[in-house]
Amino acid sequence: MDKTELIQKAKLAEQAERYDDMAACMKQVTEQGAELTNEERNLLSVAYKNVVGARRSAWRVISSIEQKTEGNDKKLQMVKEYREKVEAELRDICNEVLVRLYSIMPIYYSIYSILTMY
């Protein structure tokens, strides 16, 4: 798909509130290597904000359930494993966002690398 089609698909996904699809489209746009316009940066931001937000909301609910679960070790273990799964998804998404940002802003990545060395 070319950049224009990906942007249109991302906008459609946003209207349908399918933010995982929106993020996937914007990921493909960033992989093309061209500088993003303001609109494209906003689409990227909205996509990942909502993808992360959904997982954060799930994490809060699961953590609350985990804290309220008493005496049932089997259920507690299941809830804990599910929370860990959501945490892993969050970690992966956040790492993906950083990779996307570093790929479209290499100068900032270089500065960040230098600053984090100390």
Image (cartoon, rainbow, N blue to C red):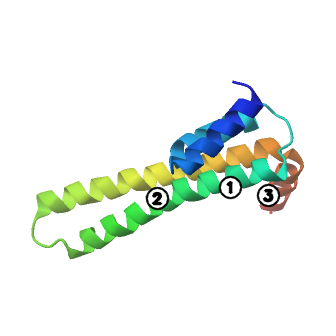
Which residue shows up at 28% across the image and 59% down it? Answer: 80
Please identify the quarter of the rendering in which residue 50 is found: bottom right
Is residue 54 depicted above or below 100 in this figure? below
- Sequence-wise, the earlier of marks 2 and 3 is 2
Q: Which residue is mark 1?
A: 45
The CA distance from mark 3 to mark 1 is 27 Å
Amino acid at circle 1: Ser
The CA distance from mark 1 to mark 2 is 14 Å
Drawn side of residue 108 relative to residue 12, left or right: right
Instruction: Tell me if mark 2 has few (under 14), some (14-19) or many (20+) residues whose alpha carbon lies within 10 angstroms of its own.
Output: few
Residue sticking out furthest to the left: 71
Mark 3 touches mark 1? (CB < 8 Å):
no
Front-most of residues 85 and 24: 24
Drawn side of residue 76 relative to residue 4, left or right: left
Is residue 21 depicted above or below 14 in this figure? above
Q: Which residue is mark 2?
A: 54
Foreground: disc 3 or disc 1: 1
Residue 69 is situated, as x and y percent measured from the top left of the image, at 18, 71
The CA distance from mark 2 to mark 3 is 33 Å
Q: Which residue is mark 3?
A: 117
Please identify the quarter of the rendering in which residue 99 is found: top right
Q: Quadrant of the N terminus?
A: top right
Residue 56 is situated, as x and y percent measured from the top left of the image, at 46, 63
Residue 77 is situated, as x and y percent measured from the top left of the image, at 21, 57
Residue 19 is situated, as x and y percent measured from the top left of the image, at 54, 48
Is residue 107 depicted above or below 8 in this figure? below
Amino acid at circle 3: Met
